[in-house]
Image (cartoon, grey):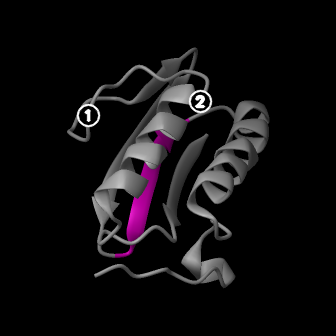
Amino acid sequence: MEHDINLNIHYTILKNLWNKVVEVFHSMPYWSGNDCNADVMWTGDDIELYYSIESGGIQITGQMPYETWRKWYPDLKRKLTDVLGYEIGEPEDGYDFKYWD
């Protein structure tokens, strides 16, 4: 199943907080990437997800079976919420951005 989501993590995020985001990414099942380029970041059976930093937030796009996604995605949001200290979700669902200078 195709997924294309944006999370309310603004590109102005401070480096120390970005490092925490990366740690969360590394902790997630199926992690296989090392940096933010065109390489697949999470892989597995029928899994091929990428992330990028966009003006509309962190984008995660690609393939993951629905049953895997419905467990994986809420876990990702919960972990990011815990480390960043504000609720993480999709801006189109009403989740606000936090901006940094």
Secondary element type, mark 1: loop
Whether residue 71 sits left or right of residue 20 in the image: it is: right
Which residue of the protein is positioned furthest toward the top in this rendering? 45
The 10 Å Cα crowd at callout 2, few under 14, some 14 to 19, many 20 or more, is some
What stretch of residues is rendered in magenta? Answer: 56-63
| Count of residue discs | 2
Q: Is residue 72 magenta?
A: no
Q: How far apart are labels 2 and 1 at the CA level?
A: 15 Å
Tell me which residue sits at (61%, 40%) in the image: 1
Which residue of the protein is positioned furthest toward the front in this rendering? 16
Rendering coords of residue 61 (x, y %): 45, 48
Please state, as top left, top right, bottom left or bottom right, where the C terminus lies in the image.
bottom left
Task: Mark 2 or mark 1: name the one nearer the start of the chain.
Answer: 2
Rendering coords of residue 77 (x, y %): 66, 53
What's under tag 1, amino acid-wise? Asp
Secondary element type, mark 2: loop
According to the picture, the residue beneath numbered tag 1 turns out to be 35
Instruction: Give yes or no for contact between labels 2 and 1 (Cβ–Cβ under 8 Å).
Output: no
Rendering coords of residue 24 (x, y %): 54, 39
According to the picture, the residue beneath numbered tag 2 turns out to be 28
What's under tag 2, amino acid-wise? Met
Q: Relative to 20, say whether 33 is above or below.
A: above
Tell me which residue sits at (41%, 60%) in the image: 58
Tell me which residue sits at (25%, 41%) in the image: 36
Rendering coords of residue 50 (x, y %): 38, 40
